[in-house]
Amino acid sequence: MTKLLIALGIGIIAGGIDVFPMIKKPIPRASIWSLFVQWILISLVISYINWYAEGWLRGLIIAELGMIPFIILALHRNKNAVLPFILTAAPLGMLMGLILDILN
């Protein structure tokens, strides 16, 4: 239960960091909420996946893979949003993996 709560907390923090700059912009609320929930799910996957890799590497890989659906949508809607998705996912995923590795 503690592992689940830690993963949820880290995911909520990461999601908040990622969506906070988007709140004032004319972005549909459904897009913001879906990205927020995606970070919570990514934190759960990073926390529970059983790979023999460093936490930061697991976080980087899972976060980038988790952003693929958003990148596909961004390619269709707004090509300028692709690079921010990639650049935001890398450090947040690495940090989440590192923290979850230390706390679990």
Image (cartoon, helix red, strand yellow):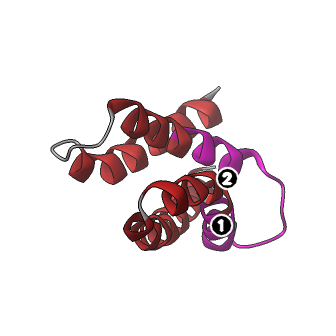
Q: Quadrant of residue 29?
A: top left
Furthest residue in direction top, as rendered: 1
Q: Quadrant of residue 15?
A: top left
Q: Position of residue 71 (x, y in %)?
A: 56, 60
Amino acid tagged 2: Ile
Q: Position of residue 62 (x, y in %)?
A: 68, 60
Quadrant placement of the N terminus: top right
**Range covered by the magenta-colored residues:** 40-64
Q: Position of residue 85 (x, y in %)?
A: 46, 64
Nearer to us in this view, 92 or 78: 78
Q: Is residue 68 in sight in this rendering?
A: yes
Q: Which mark is residue 55?
A: 1
Nearer to us in this view, 45 or 50: 45
* Residue at screen point 67% across, 52% down: 46
Q: Is residue 2 above or below residue 97?
A: above
Q: Position of residue 61 (x, y in %)?
A: 68, 68
Residue that badge 2 annotates: 46
Q: Is residue 9 in sight in this rendering?
A: no
Instruction: Please say if the residues under marks 1 and 2 sit with CB atoms less than 8 Å apart.
Output: yes
State yes or no: residue 41 in magenta. Answer: yes
